[in-house]
Image (spheres, coloured by chain):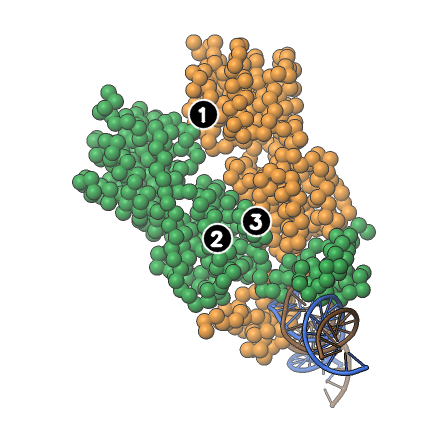
Chain colours: A orange, B green, C blue, D brown
Amino acid sequence: MSARSEKTIVDIAEELGLSVSTVSRALNDHPNISVKTKDKVKKMARKLGYRPNAMAAGLRNNKSKTIGLIIPRISMFFPAAITTVVQNKLQEYGYHLIICQSNDSLEQEQELVNTLYSARIDGLAVSATLSTTDFSHFDIFKQHNIPVVFFDRTPKDYQAKVIKGDDFLGGYTATEHLIEQGCRDIVHISGPLTCNLYKERLAGYKDALSKHKLPFKKPRVFFHELTRENALATAEKIFAQQPYPDGVFATNDTTAITILEYCRKQGIRVPEDVKIVGYSNDPRTEIVTPSITSVDQFSATMGERVVAALMDLIQNRHPNSYRHPQEIVPIQLIKRESSAGSPKKKK
Amino acid sequence: MSARSEKTIVDIAEELGLSVSTVSRALNDHPNISVKTKDKVKKMARKLGYRPNAMAAGLRNNKSKTIGLIIPRISMFFPAAITTVVQNKLQEYGYHLIICQSNDSLEQEQELVNTLYSARIDGLAVSATLSTTDFSHFDIFKQHNIPVVFFDRTPKDYQAKVIKGDDFLGGYTATEHLIEQGCRDIVHISGPLTCNLYKERLAGYKDALSKHKLPFKKPRVFFHELTRENALATAEKIFAQQPYPDGVFATNDTTAITILEYCRKQGIRVPEDVKIVGYSNDPRTEIVTPSITSVDQFSATMGERVVAALMDLIQNRHPNSYRHPQEIVPIQLIKRESSAGSPKKKK
DNA sequence: ATTCTTTATGCAAACGTTTGCAGATCCGGA
DNA sequence: TCCGGATCTGCAAACGTTTGCATAAAGAAT
């Protein structure tokens, strides 16, 4: 039969007349093993086609060399971009990545936390659900001293390592940019305020308005999950009655794109009649006509920091140190056509 | 200390005065255990905060309840779309997904195969590297009877389960559509022919030409990795000298988009002067102006089939049955503006 | 009562590693 | 010749489950 059984270190040991412990140490480059023995062992391992059994080692060591990742969904640009670099980076460190999607459901998130704990992952990276305000289901990791790093969609009052974009500054910068481009009546399309980052972008929006002595008007802010349909409905509301706003700051690029499409269909000119700024610098903003100004969040940097934080926490298990400094990743406004010029000056 | 040690089934057993075997069976709903005992055990498990140790169980059972996935990169639309549904589907079956990126490097792919084998995954799904022509590094899975399913970028002469799009028909349909829209001189931008699916799309292109009595001209086909830069370079070559082609069939949406951008910059009108068709139905094709006709590959269907195949193979280990029928997922041409009308009729 | 089933539980080995400790070997120096 | 120390190797336990087999208890049939 070709279904030959899998080789183990005891096969190597027997073949060589050595003990399993010696073989184990040889394979792990333990200093107490002579070079000669190591060579012999490694050669035999190769000859037999030996592949270590990670589960056995993991059981013994109580570590799986695996990191868990929970994101709302892989198909969204920003989490996907981060996932890409996290996975590549972890691969360098010899860690695996188990990726799970919460599909923005709190229940699924809770369940995933449990099954990932069962899998005995060595660390967890999480971008939470829109509706996650209570983070106590992550307690189990805390109790067992397994590092958890939150990124992007992060908790507010939960003691944990947090890596997030500078959402306040992002909101501020986007709004100020619109003002500088001549806008005086700026709509903000925000997400559910259960999610921290939308709150902060909103705060940035307000702050920019007030700094520039523009009034904040409640009906000029819309809150909803940032789906295409919702964005479309909002677009209709926004442009249902005159006067139109002269600027739209969407807290999400999908929404910005949808607004742009709506405007084009309705013959509302962008940027002449209304200027648009999005958020995240989704590559789609660049290929659309006109291209959309957006706030870049440096996904690569964020991903790298997530991995760095995890590796750091894994290596020097700060057992009871509850000081988890929050890391802020900078943002950058990428100016494009959708907010170009000033209507007055151009004509 | 809050760092309380993890509870195991022996803790439950001691607490209840039962044996570990009874506890284990109770938790797994073994029929030989009385309902009363099961209830007691489960209640105690909950009370102690017991979480099964998947590694220990895996070691014993020789199965990890984990599937490996190797794709070129997560950030590309099509593999990402498939990954999304594969992950969600596997979650339903109680399986984890370890995602790895080969970054289109054969060496990385080989390495990943080995470390995934070490992780003792129960099955593997692969979309290969562009340059993978020799698939023997997957032999180790074959030898140990661990199911491997290839999708999208699949091997040709390697005995394995394969799930792929109907690339020949896709190439044919795209080309024929351009012909029907009035094109007579159609450029095809293909990928490296080391990759199977490009070959088939090219064959479809040729076949459509010949069926419609149009000559196949070698210089009208370009081969290169489908990056933005390469596409741009090709665009310059294509439009360097008259006569321009009146149709471009790009085997990839990124390329199609790049060509479109180039044309717009050069004042070449799409679809009036040249019509464009892409491949994969990347959502970007829809938001670009003009929107781009593309061949949809039903990523969701493909993902579901991958999971179905894996689950099937895992359940009834067909040990030496080498009959691995290849599954073909249909395609559908999504007609959009970039190939609309016929230049003659419109004017 | 005795035997035979049926039902529920326990014993102990096994999965493939790693590692603390003990022991063996070898070498040079006195 | 003997000893101390360095260097290398082996023994055996442990990690947390699962499971074949044996056994105990309880009820049914005689």
Residue B331 in view:
yes
Mark 3 chain? B
* Secondary structure type for disc 1: loop
Q: Is residue A91 left or right of residue B215?
A: right
Q: Residue at x 57, y 18 (%)?
A: A187
Q: Between B8 and B31, which is closer to the camera in this rendering?
A: B31
Q: Which label number is shown at residue A291?
A: 1
Question: On the picture, is D18 further left or further right than B317?
Answer: right
**Up/down of B134 relative to A107, above or below:** below
Q: Is residue A197 above or below residue A151?
A: above
Is residue B9 found left or right of A12 in the rendered image? Answer: right
The image quadrant that residue B222 belongs to is top left
Chain letter of the residue beneath label 2 in the structure image = B
Amino acid type at image mark 1: Ser
Q: Find numbered disc 3 in the image and state the secondary structure of the residue it sits on.
A: helix
Residue under numbered circle 2: B308
**Residue flagged by tag 3: what amino acid is it?**
Glu
**C-alpha separation, residue under disc 2 versus residue under disc 3:** 12 Å
**Which is closer to the viewer, label 1 or label 3?**
3
Residue position for label 3: B92
Task: Work out whether B86 lies above or below B148.
Answer: above
Residue B266, given in percent of the width and then of the height, sits at 31, 26
Give the class, few, some or many, for how many residues have Cα within 10 Å of label 1's Cα (few <14, many ≥20).
many
State the separation of the CA atoms marked 1 and 3: 40 Å
Snapshot quadrant of residue B134 = bottom left
The image quadrant that residue A331 belongs to is top right
Q: CA distance from mark 2 to mark 1?
A: 41 Å
